[in-house]
Image (spheres, rainbow, N blue to C red):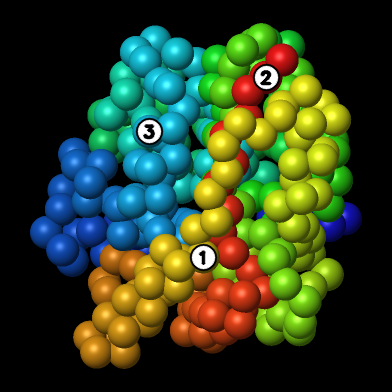
């Protein structure tokens, strides 16, 4: 039941139409998109494109590798990896609408041959053992209650010596967390864990953490700058409010509060599959 509620949290109903309308307003040709035009809306995690680039640069990517992007959303990370690193990317997302929109935007950007998307659960990956050389996951674990199953599936689908990169919001201190958050309307579908718990579960399935970075300061700066721009100029024509909805300002305020009170921190981990 929780996965259904989570998928409904992210579902919009007319997301593709709103994104294409916004792009048209900005002068873009919806049938011949430059992937860079999509960056303001398709990098749905703290830090946006900058965070994607930094994580990708730590995955030891080279042309031709097979990459799985878990929780691929609108496909921004997948398209960036395919274009910058010449890898073949499969995106998996729980929300059917996201999968449809990601595939459509990729086709419109001329990338349908190098990125593909499937709907499915991260705790029961629909891929054979050893299907991927790399796996990445950006802001997904907060919606996954059974992280042991999640990490076990990632280890199963990675080749030996493969690399897993995770960039999640993690619990780093005690205190009340205010909702709604970008990933959950209430605490009922928010499954936050601390870095130590991540390390333990990853080690248990054969994905020991090789490197780790607390990105709280980076996150605070990003959210402050985002809120300041919106306060000064209003929501951009093509912006995260299209994905996050009418309560975007409240979600960002609650996220900023938890980061500044050191309750949460976006945290990056790089793991090597045994």
Q: Position of residue 39 (x, y in %)?
A: 30, 52
Q: Position of residue 264 (x, y in %)?
A: 64, 69
Query: Are there few (<14), some (14-19), or many (20+) residues within 10 Å of tag 2?
Result: many
Q: Is residue 239 left or right of residue 193?
A: left
Secondary structure, mark 3, is loop
Residue at image position (72%, 27%) is: 207
Please report whichever mark, 1 or 3, sits nearer to the chain's N-terminal start: 3
Query: Are there few (<14), some (14-19), or many (20+) residues within 10 Å of tag 1?
Result: many
Could you tell me which quadrant the N terminus lies in? bottom right
Mark on residue 216? 1
Image marks 1 and 3: residues in contact by CB distance under 8 Å: no
Q: Quadrant of residue 119?
A: top right
Instruction: In the rendered view, tell whether residue 77 sits above or below residue 255.
Output: above
Q: Is residue 252 left or right of residue 119?
A: left
Mark on residue 59? none
Q: Position of residue 70 (x, y in %)?
A: 60, 37
- Residue tagged 3: 57
- Residue tagged 2: 273
Secondary structure, mark 1, is helix
Residue at image position (80%, 49%) is: 197
Please report whichever mark, 3 or 2, sits nearer to the chain's N-terminal start: 3
Name the foreground residue: 263 vs 17.
Answer: 263
Give the CA distance from mark 1 to mark 3: 19 Å
Q: How many numbered circles does the render carry?
A: 3
Q: Is residue 10 visible?
A: no
Instruction: In the rendered view, tell whether residue 206 sits above or below residue 239.
Output: above
Q: Quadrant of residue 192?
A: bottom right
Q: Position of residue 241 (x, y in %)?
A: 42, 72
Please report whichever mark, 2 or 1, sits nearer to the chain's N-terminal start: 1
């Amino acid at each position: 039941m929780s996965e259904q509620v989570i998928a409904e949290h992210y579902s919009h109903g007319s997301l593709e139409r709103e994104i294409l309308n916004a792009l048209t307003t900005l002068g873009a040709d919806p049938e011949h998109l430059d992937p860079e035009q999509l960056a303001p809306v398709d990098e749905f995690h703290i830090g946006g494109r900058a965070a994607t680039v930094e994580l990708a640069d730590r995955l030891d990517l080279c042309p031709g590798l097979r990459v799985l992007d878990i929780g691929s959303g609108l496909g921004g990370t997948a398209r960036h990896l395919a274009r910058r690193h010449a890898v073949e990317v499969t995106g998996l997302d729980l929300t059917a609408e996201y999968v449809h929109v990601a595939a459509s935007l990729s086709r419109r950007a001329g990338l349908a041959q190098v990125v593909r998307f499937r709907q499915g659960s991260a705790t029961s990956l629909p891929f054979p053992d050893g299907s991927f050389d790399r796996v990445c996951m950006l802001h997904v674990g907060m919606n996954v209650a059974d992280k042991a199953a999640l990490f076990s599936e990632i280890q199963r689908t990675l080749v030996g010596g493969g690399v897993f990169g995770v960039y999640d919001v993690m619990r780093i201190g005690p205190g009340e967390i205010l909702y709604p958050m970008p990933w959950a309307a209430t605490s009922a579908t928010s499954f936050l864990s601390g870095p130590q718990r991540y390390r333990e579960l990853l080690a248990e399935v054969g994905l020991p953490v090789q490197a780790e970075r607390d990105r709280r300061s980076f996150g605070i700066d990003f959210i402050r700058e985002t809120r300041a721009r919106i306060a000064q100029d209003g929501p951009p024509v093509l912006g995260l409010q299209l994905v996050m909805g009418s309560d975007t300002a409240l979600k960002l305020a609650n996220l900023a509060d938890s980061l500044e009170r050191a309750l949460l921190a976006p945290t990056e981990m790089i793991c090597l599959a045994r």
